[in-house]
Image (spheres, rainbow, N blue to C red):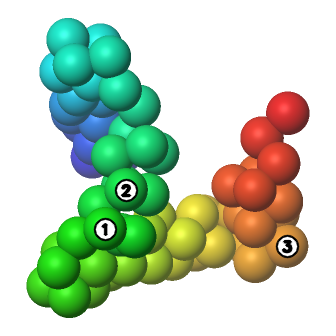
Amino acid sequence: MLKNVARECRKINLELNGVLEKYHDSLSCVLGNGFFYGTDEEREEISEKVSKIVDLAVEAHGAKKAITELLMPE
């Protein structure tokens, strides 16, 4: 099951990267601008997505490692 999830994630990531490259943008820029300049509904949706990412990372790696990896990837 995890292999299937990983494969689907890679597939979606490739598609997303293609769209972002096409429009010369990054996902962080899209989400950041959407959060700061979007409607209340858009802000809530973006906030929920980011929260889910953090939750998944914490669940997989523990809070300290997840936050460190998310905020300081290098």
The mark nearer the N terminus, 1 or 3, is 1
Badge 2, how many Cα within 10 Å: few under 14, some, many 20+?
A: few
Q: CA distance from mark 2 to mark 3?
A: 27 Å
- Across and down, in percent, residue 5 comes to 28, 42
- Across and down, in percent, residue 61 comes to 70, 63
| Residue 53 shows in the view | yes
Q: Amino acid at mark 2?
A: Asn
Q: Is residue 35 above or below residue 2?
A: below
Q: Is residue 68 above or below residue 55?
A: above
Q: Amino acid at mark 3?
A: Lys
Callout 2 touching callout 3 (CB < 8 Å): no
Q: Amino acid at mark 1?
A: Tyr
For residue 33, side relative to residue 69 (left or right): left
Query: Where does label 2 land, which residue?
Result: 33
Query: Where does label 1 land, which residue?
Result: 37
Check disc 1 and report its element: helix, strand or loop: helix
Callout 2 touching callout 1 (CB < 8 Å): yes
Check disc 2 and report its element: helix, strand or loop: helix
Please tell me which residue lies in front, 3 or 29.
Answer: 29
Badge 3, how many Cα within 10 Å: few under 14, some, many 20+?
A: few
Query: Where does label 3 land, which residue?
Result: 64
Q: Residue 19, located in which quarter of the rendered image?
A: top left
